[in-house]
Amino acid sequence: MSGNEKLYLRQNIQVEPLIDSWYAWSHLIPPATASRNITERHLKIMDSYIGAPQVHANAVKNPKMAGGPFIDHGGKKVDEIRALRDHIKMERKHLIEFSQAIGDLDSMLRDSAKGHSLQPLYAKVPDILRGYVELVYDLNNHPSFRLIEPLLYRSKYYDRSQQSLMLSVISQDDRPFVLSTPRLECDSSLHLKLAFDDKVIDELFRLKSIARPWFEIKEMLRIPGSKENLMRSFLTSEPPPPYAAYNGSGVRWRYFGHACILIESQGISMLFDPVLSYTYETGISRYTYTDLPDQIDYVLITHNHQDHVLFETLLQIRHKVKNIVVPRCGGGHLQDPSLKLLLQNCGFKNVIEISELEEIHDGNTRITGLPFLGEHADLDIMSKMAWLVRIEQHALLFAADSCNIETRLYEYLHDYVGDVHAVFLGMECDGAPLSWLYGPLVTQRMERAMDESRRLSGCNYDQALNIVSLFNCKEAYVYAMGQEPWLNHIMSIKYTDQSRPIVESNRLVEACRQRGIIAERLFGEKEILLELPGVSDFGKIESALSAITS
Ligand SMILES: [Fe+2]
Ligand SMILES: [Fe+2]
């Protein structure tokens, strides 16, 4: 083996971003929100596993328990999980105290803030929170607090040494559900202690398309001698297939699975909610990392759920991303951390934050942020946006999990933006209850019926058809259903033909087709080319001109 041989990173190397061995999703990065997940999710799950590992092993096998708080390590990793728990308890003491202080602050406000001035209560704020919170009432005298989030990222509560990457080979879709199962070390994995904003991460992923000599690679990644053979096995001298950009005169969109769609038109590329599969032999055809252009002009995030803002994919494409567009957050709520701060602290440049009805103009392309209702268990969360993309006369609406709980909104939006050629809409109308995602942030016991009634649900048949009709859509695509098996590690969805989201979306597709609207529930991969009326007219003029001159 020559040290000068130029090598690429193989396309089937899985790279998991980790925080203290837990899969890094977007609630594990903002310090306050992360602290609550450590105490109320991770430590509780690990304690439970240590006490009854077999219960976890059995629950994981039961499809009805999918996505539940169970560790998927076959009940055989008690020592490793105990060591991890003890490490976190020892090393993250300050974050554990921070989380407890949030609980104490909430209960102090419930007991003491009765509508009178909050000023005297600052003295009662737990010491470690003082200076990081402002106490506030809503107009109904309900007390709450807002976090000064930018300051927290500059404090000891944001600790980059918790962050790392785990490299291993992936050859099939099935992966443990990552919200409940920490990643353990093993001989076939390479654990790189790299913080997410480290520029070496971009160099690592550039290796997928640009080869470098082995001696440079091992030096760059500081590979220990004992892991050199393993790292070498993750590399190949075989170049990836070249990417063929779309150079046609219209618009090409490609569905990569779930809510991930790439649009290319007139030299501009846009990638929505990047969640990508690695490249390996499989029975389900799909686009993967090798189907991305060298530069992505705009990455657009619809909302802060783990299946729409996926660090594993985002870090791998960061070096290609010119701009990343996110919805503006409400400001300082535990449940609504700033996506802008989060991405900036993870090394993203050019993060553009957009409010409702704000626009980006680039050449003939206009991107407008449209309000996104619901799907967040009625919590005050602003970090959610449907994206309307207009290229020439074409309008495409990426509504993700927006739920049409108030049809009047869409009437007003139609008045404002006009007809939409194609809509992309999620129909996960049986969403998880509040506690599934936000439970760790709630500091007061919640009645079960209350929790069950407040769900992360998208549109049902009536709500979806209403949107398609109001915007006079010519095409309607149901997407973001979590059906692709390469999403198993972040989704917990196992549908049957009787599942409501399947029944309701089948009805929508049928109803649309009866009305002459092209409709489909997307799965796996799809490519559509749209002619631009203006451009094809131009094309006709051009060919008429050439006919005259010849
Ligand atoms: Fe969602
Ligand atoms: Fe979703």
Image (cartoon, rainbow, N blue to C red):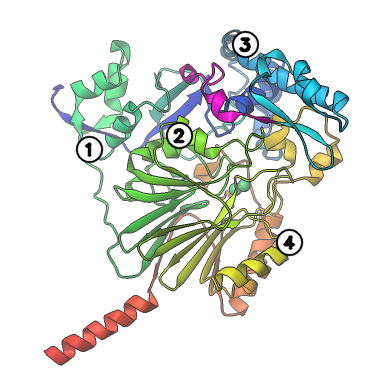
Figure disc tally? 4
Amino acid type at mark 3: Lys
- The residue labelled by disc 1 is 210
Q: What residue type is labelled 4?
A: Glu
Distance in Å between CA atoms under marks 4 and 1: 50 Å
Say which of marks 4 and 1 sits in front.
4
Label 1 close to label 3 by CB (< 8 Å): no
Rounded to the nearest angstrom, the CA distance separating label 2 from label 1 is 26 Å
Q: Residue 344 — which label?
A: 2
Image location of residue 526, percent across then percent down: 44, 60
Q: Is mark 4 on a helix, strand or loop?
A: loop
Which image quadrant for residue 88? top right
The segment highlighted magenta reads 146-162
Q: Does ligand 1 reach within 8 Å of label 2's beta carbon? A: no
In screen coordinates, is 539 left or right of 113?
A: left
- The residue to which callout 4 is attached is 406
Judging from the image, what secondary structure is the residue with disc 2 in?
A: helix
Q: In which quarter of the image is the C terminus?
A: bottom left
Q: Where is residue 8 in the image (x, y as percent from the top left)?
A: 24, 34
Quadrant position of residue 491: top right
Q: Is residue 213 above or below residue 419?
A: above
**Gap between marks 4 and 3 measured at Cα:** 44 Å
Residue 492 covered by magenta stretch? no
| N-term mark: 1 or 3 | 3
